């Protein structure tokens, strides 16, 4: 079977700060998970010197993650359209349709097609907000425990809550990575590479269909804030790059 070429459009989606925050927080979480898992598994079997070094990695990683999370939460309110909280919630009819179609796709085991979406998937958006809440609680617990003497911290109910937060965040990351890979394979919109160069790939028909959804987003923004300032770039083709995709 001969390969066919299909024109598709790389549309700018993720801004540089959002991409930098994504990888900053991902690296900080890796340090947290690695050091936290080591402390949970080998805590009593390690020497005090080694435990102290791992604690330092855990604390530094925690504060680095906290700094990134604070900036990301601020960016939810002042960033460009695809970085804001409205992009995470199924507010428009198009977002609610994508929510339903994504659920249908998951229930079918990815046998049904994945609807294209410009920014965050409306089905995953509420999970991201839940992640922010759990992460804030986890940071608060970690700071509280770091201010206690070690013997008191280890026996504190806060430590149990902190460990549960660890497993919740770890579960989120595992599911997130698995679904991103599944969407990458099934949808072919370049989700992983988009978090590097900022552009998602759409076929010409998908790009045209999405413009109707972006117009609807403009209408919702106008209803909520009395204007469309900050959303004008949604319907702009500035920055689009047309390429050829080999099927």
Image (cartoon, rainbow, N blue to C red):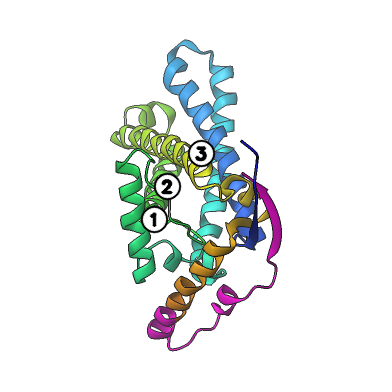
Mark closer to the chain start, 2 or 1:
1
Label 1, on which residue? 129
Q: In which quarter of the image is the C terminus?
A: top right
Name the mark nearer the viewer: 1 or 3: 3
> Dot 1: within a 10 Å radius of its alpha carbon, few (fewer than 14), some, or many (20 or more) residues?
some
Q: Residue at x 43, y 80 (%)?
A: 221
Residue 117 placement (x, y as % from top left): 48, 60
Which disc number belongs to residue 135? Answer: 2
Residue farthest top in this picture: 45
State whether residue 78 is above or below residue 117: below
- Residue 200 is situated, as x and y percent measured from the top left of the image, at 60, 56
- Secondary structure of the residue carrying numbered label 1: helix
Q: Which residue lies furthest to the front in this view?
A: 1
Residue 181 image label: 3
Instruction: Report the residue at 48% width, 28% height from top.
Output: 36
Mark 3 residue crowding within 10 angstroms, few (<14) / some (14–19) / many (20+):
some
Of the numbered discs 2 and 3, the one sitting upstream in the chain is: 2
Bounds of the magenta segment: 219-247
Query: Distance from label 2 to label 3 (Cα)?
Result: 23 Å
Q: Is mark 2 on a helix, strand or loop?
A: helix
Alpha carbon distance from label 1 to label 3: 21 Å
Tell me which numbered mark, 1 or 3, is placed earlier along the sequence.
1
In this picture, residue 197 sits left or right of residue 118? right
Q: Is residue 23 above or below residue 7?
A: above
The residue drawn where x is 42% and y is 61% is 88
As helix, strand or loop, the secondary structure at mark 3 comes to helix
The x, y position of residue 24, in whole percent, is 61, 46
Q: Residue at x 60, y 75 (%)?
A: 233
Magenta run includes residue 221: yes
């Amino acid at each position: 079977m001969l390969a066919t070429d299909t024109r598709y459009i790389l549309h700018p989606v993720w801004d540089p700060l959002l991409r930098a925050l994504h990888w900053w927080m991902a690296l900080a979480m890796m340090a947290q998970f690695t050091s936290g898992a080591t402390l949970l598994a080998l805590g009593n079997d390690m020497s005090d010197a080694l435990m102290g070094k791992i604690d330092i990695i855990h604390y530094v990683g925690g504060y680095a993650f906290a700094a990134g999370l604070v900036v990301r939460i601020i960016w939810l309110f002042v960033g460009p359209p695809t970085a804001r909280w409205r992009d995470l919630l199924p507010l428009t009819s198009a977002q609610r349709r994508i929510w339903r179609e994504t659920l249908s796709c998951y229930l079918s085991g990815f046998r049904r097609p994945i609807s294209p979406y410009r920014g965050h998937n409306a089905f995953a958006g509420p999970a991201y907000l839940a992640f922010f809440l759990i992460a804030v609680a986890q940071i608060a617990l970690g700071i509280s425990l770091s201010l206690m003497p070690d013997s008191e911290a280890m026996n504190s109910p806060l430590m149990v809550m902190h460990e549960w937060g660890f497993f919740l965040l770890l579960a989120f990351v595992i599911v997130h990575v698995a679904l991103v890979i599944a969407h990458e394979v099934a949808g072919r919109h370049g989700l992983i590479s988009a978090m590097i160069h900022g552009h998602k790939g759409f076929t010409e028909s998908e790009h045209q269909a999405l413009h109707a959804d972006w117009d609807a987003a403009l209408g919702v923004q106008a209803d909520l804030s009395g204007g469309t300032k900050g959303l004008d770039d949604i319907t702009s083709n500035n920055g689009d790059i047309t390429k050829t995709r080999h099927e």
